[in-house]
Amino acid sequence: MKRCAVLLPIVLAGCALAPDPPASIDTNRVPIVYGGGGAARAWFRISEQRWGEFVALLGSCRTAADERHAVREAIGLMERIAGEQTITWMDKARNGNGGPTEQGQLDCIDESTNTDVYLRLFQQRGLLRFHRVLRPVWRAPHLIDTHRTAVIQDLADGQRYAVDSWFLDNGFPAYVQPLEDWIRKAPFPPD
């Protein structure tokens, strides 16, 4: 019990470190965090031409399943664009070799915060037609194995999905799976 009393403030501190998403996101100044727990903040720009790639990718979806697949690709593309303008191009899967404070590295708070911002930008611009963005969610099966993810919800059936880019290097498509599966640490579905 004493162990939980010591760890709970640490977990809650991680929650406090994650900034709230901006009310409105400008493609000329998209916020990004890195360095572990949002320690470093920067901004990047999405040109009209690059924004057109998101419009083509997400705008062509005909079903919720199509949109979830497109979201995977769109998060990877957004990470590549951000990496062209910030040091996040160096981000390695999970916490990399040197941990979340290694230069250019993102931890799960950083990844879920950024993914949440990107999803909210898509939603604000009308590119998500089958889902809505919910607040990021924590899982803490043993309070020492905590992890955080961005979340979308299917508008038709209410199913919630984890959108998790932490497990892969910068620029790869994010994993998307039912939130219940993510919470119980089920393997990610194959591509």
Image: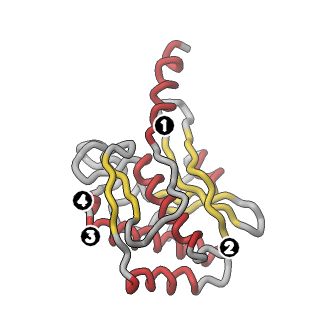
Q: Which mark is residue 84?
A: 3
Question: Label 1, on which residue?
Answer: 16
Instruction: Point out the tag, 2 or 4, that comes first from the N-terminus.
Output: 4
Instruction: Point out the tag, 1 or 4, that comes first from the N-terminus.
Output: 1
Secondary structure under the numbered disc 3 in the rendered image = helix
Residue type pointed to by label 4: Ile
Instruction: Point out the tag, 2 or 1, that comes first from the N-terminus.
Output: 1
Q: Residue at x 47, y 73 (%)?
A: 74
| Nearest-to-viewer mark from 2 and 1 | 1
Residue type pointed to by label 2: Phe
Q: Quadrant of the N terminus?
A: top right
Task: Give x and y (percent) for residue 18.
Answer: 46, 44
Secondary structure under the numbered disc 1 in the rendered image = helix
Q: Which mark is residue 87?
A: 4
Tally of numbered tags: 4
Residue type pointed to by label 1: Ala
Task: Give x and y (percent) for residue 117.
Answer: 49, 60
Packing grade of label 1 (10 A; few <14, some 14-19, many >=20) is few
Tell me whether the residue at label 3 lies in contact with that at label 2, contact meaning CB atoms closer than 8 angstroms: no
Outermost residue, right side: 157
Residue type pointed to by label 3: Glu
Q: Residue at x 48, y 24 (%)?
A: 7
